[in-house]
Image (cartoon, helix red, strand yellow):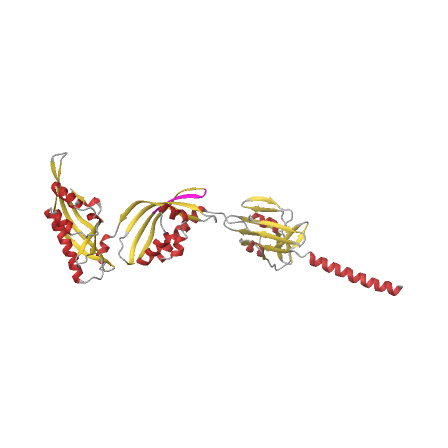
Amino acid sequence: MKKISFLLCLVMLSTLFSAVAFGAEETKIEVWIDEEKVEFEEEPFSDNGTTLVPFRVLFSELGLNVKWDQATKTVTGINDTITVELTLESNEAIINGETIELLVAPQLVNNHTFVPLRFVGEATGASVQWDGATKTISITSPEPEVNDEELILELFDRYVAATNDRDLDGFLEVFNEQYEMHRDIDLEEISSHFFEEYDIETTMEELEIIEIDNDEAIVFAIEVYERVNGDFYIDNKQEIIYTLHKNKDGLWQISEDEILVYEKINLDKLKEINAEISSKDEKKILDTLEKYFRALEDGDAALLASTFHEDSIVLEEDGVFEESMEFLFEIAEFEDIDLEHASVVSISDEEYAKLYVIRDIEISYYDYENDDTISESVEGLHEIFHFKKSKNGNWKLMELESLFDESNILE
């Protein structure tokens, strides 16, 4: 019996030690921050229901910069929005200058300063959850505050970058489906063609957020578009009002735009563009231009009409253009047309050409209201003459595009 009792004692003792060991493992506390396990140099422990952990690792994982004051035994954690101060053996903590009472004071264990985990976590705005069954503490960092102004500015940074890089996918991400519906266009098709044909540098000269109202924003922008390479393009500056809306993911996109001001700029740079064209074709284009000017000065409506291509919209209705010009020549005279510059700046499909022209002109007309003849001079009139090659090889006008600033008109 004694032997059996002795064996029983050994078994019971062994079981007791196993239970103690198991209990010791069971009390080991794990800490997870944003689903990542945190490893400490010293194991966390519980004191009166409060979990304490080494401060340096905790502060670092929570995005706090650490300062240690040896004289006062005070640890300070700092980020953009919060300053937390805890002192060894003190039940008072300070958050952004406000004193808070702690349930358990920070402690020094094995030359490591331990601080209350829940207090520090919640001070940063994080969510702290305790799972008693697994002895696990889970900390979830707060969602970053949504700064709509920063998101909108970032949207236009991406817009400018995608435009300059001719990044079609990046460019399309800036706009929503409502933009296409409002414009009644296929944005992908138009943008793809534009990026293939042109090399334009976009600069955001001014950007102002006028209003943000829940999921809608109004933005004013001044944008400058300047040709770098590629096909002929007239540099311009635009003042635009954008309407933005948030998508289902909370990201801003452009829904509408309205151009308030469109100004052509850097016109003198057009002189630097010289399209590749044969001297024969260039001469025929300039001959037509000379005939056009002669018709204006002579008041010859028939000659003027002959300078236009049969496909031109001005000749769409038979005889109407000539009649309109005959009436104009009866009340106005075009004099002293002085050609300052003419150069072919674009050729496409070997049958379309654009001629950049700078000229001066004087116009006289009768003012019936004041019974007087008025003369006006336009100096440095910038124009684009659009030509199309006829079947007989001659180049005829399709349309005229005026680039001049009305402020250049001198009475």
Quarter assignment of residue 230? bottom left
Side (left or right) of 200 relative to 97: left
Q: Residue at x 85, y 64 (%)?
A: 6
Foreground residue among 274 and 396: 396
Side (left or right) of 340 relative to 105: left
- Percent x, y of residue 193: 33, 56
Foreground residue among 264 and 284: 284
Q: Which residues are magenta?
A: 214-221
How many discs mark residues in the rendered view? Answer: 0
- Percent x, y of residue 266: 25, 52
Does residue 13 appear in the picture of this structure?
yes
Query: In the picture, which quadrant includes the C terminus?
Result: top left
Task: Give above or below for 347 relative to 409.
Answer: below
- Percent x, y of residue 109: 65, 56
Farthest residue, direction bottom: 3
Foreground residue among 293 and 374: 293
Q: Main secondary structure of the magenta part?
A: strand
Farthest residue, direction front: 318
Quarter assignment of residue 324? top left
Q: Residue at x 21, y 44 (%)?
A: 407
Foreground residue among 94 and 405: 405
Q: Residue at x 17, y 62 (%)?
A: 279
Query: In the picture, which quadrant includes the N terminus?
Result: bottom right
Farthest residue, direction right: 1
Farthest residue, direction left: 298
Does residue 337 appear in the picture of this structure?
no
